[in-house]
Amino acid sequence: MREPPITADAAAAGVEATRLHNAKLGMIHFAVYLAFYLGFVFINAFRPGWMETIVLAGLNLAIVYGFGLIVAALLLALLYGRLCRTVPVARDPVFGVDEAGAAGADDTTSGDREVDRS
């Protein structure tokens, strides 16, 4: 059974809610990475001798922390990509793009709700 069509205003509200969610998620990930990076910067600025300390398999803290920053950036990017929401309606009323990314595509067999633009 098909759901009734939703209005363009309701669709736009859904799109905006999705964008806000994704923006908040991005800012949280940015804050986490910034804290990790600032730790690296502050150690280098105020306790540079610590970076010479051997911490793992003969590698010093500078190398381990630097590679940790790279790995953390990749993991946060993957996590962001996994947790981001897509447009919650069949067609984005702002850009005219469906969830599959095809502009102007009209697939009524996908089970998505239709947008009533009247």
Image (cartoon, rainbow, N blue to C red):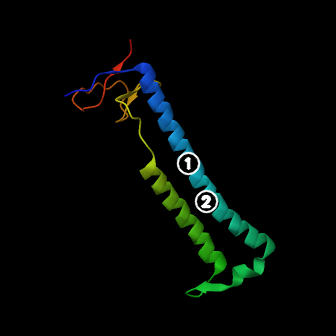
Q: Residues within 10 Å of mark 1 (few under 14, many from 20)?
A: some
For badge 2, the amino acid type reads Tyr
Tell me if residue 74 can be seen: yes
State the residue in front, 34 or 21: 21
Residue 44, percent from left and from top: 75, 72
- Mark 1 vs mark 2: which is more N-terminal? 1
Q: Does any portion of residue 95 appear in the rendered image?
A: no
Residue at x-position 44% and y-position 31%: 14
Pinpoint residue 54: horizontal percent, then vertical percent: 64, 86
Residue 106, numbered label: none
Name the residue type under label 1: Gly
Q: Provide the secondary structure element on which disc 2 rests.
A: helix
Seen at 24% across and 32% down, the residue is: 111
Write down the quadrant of residue 118 in the picture.
top left
Helix, strand or loop under label 1: helix
Question: Which quarter of the image is occupied by the N terminus?
Answer: top left
Residue 37: percent from left, percent from top? 66, 63
**Rendered residue at 56%/45% (across/down):** 24
Q: Are marks 1 and 2 in contact (CB under 8 Å)?
A: no
Q: Could you give the CA–CA distance between mark 1 and mark 2, rounded to whole angstroms?
A: 11 Å
Position in image of residue 88 (x %, y %): 39, 35
In the image, is residue 51 above or below residue 15?
below
The residue carrying mark 2 is 33
Q: How many marks?
A: 2
Task: Return the residue nearer the eye: 97 or 5.
Answer: 5
Q: Nearer the viewer, residue 118 or 71?
A: 118
Q: Which residue is mark 1?
A: 26
Q: Quadrant of residue 85?
A: top left
Judged from this view, the residue extending furthest toward the left is 1
Tell me: residue 46, above or below residue 107.
Answer: below
Category of crowding for the residue at label 2, using alpha-carbon neighbours closer than 10 angstroms: few (below 14), some (14–19), many (at least 20):
some
